[in-house]
Amino acid sequence: MQKGDELDPKGLIFEAYRIDGISAPECRTIFLDWALSVPGTHVPADLIAALLRQYAVDFPDHPMTQTLTEGLERIGQPRRRGGWRSRARDA
């Protein structure tokens, strides 16, 4: 895996794994930036799974591995909807 490939076009995840002492909150910020740049033609869960296959073996305890794992687990979980949509169902 290299900086700027199909899974990580901006090289954000690649660079996160190379930052000594990076924290979990910093990894979440990087992950959000990465997720926002995923083209609509790609399935984010597939990309995250591929990134985990690439990095988790060599970096099992890295905060980015944890962040990617959490991101994969949360995809597909129902999200609470607020505002008028939730009130409209209750009415």
Image (tube, grey):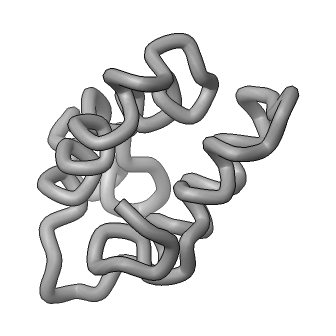
Residue 45 x %, y % = 18, 51
Q: Is residue 13 left or right of residue 25?
A: left
Can you give x and y, in whole percent of width and height, for residue 15 in the image? Answer: 66, 58
Residue 62 appears in the figure: yes
Q: Quadrant of residue 71?
A: top left
Q: Nearer the viewer, residue 79 or 28?
A: 28
Residue 90 in view: no
Relative to residue 48, is residue 23 depicted above or below? Answer: above
Residue found at x 20% / y 49%: 50
Quadrant where the N terminus sits is: bottom left
Q: Residue at x 47, y 28 (%)?
A: 65
Residue farthest top in this picture? 61
Residue for point 14% across, 67% down: 43
In the figure, 46 relative to 12: above or below?
Answer: above
Which residue is pictured at 72% across the width and 28% down the height? Answer: 24
With respect to residue 38, does 84 lie above or below? above
Where residue 52 appears, as percent x and y from the top left, is 30, 37
The x and y percentages for residue 54 are 29, 42
Question: In the orientation shown, which residue stands out farthest toward the right?
Answer: 21
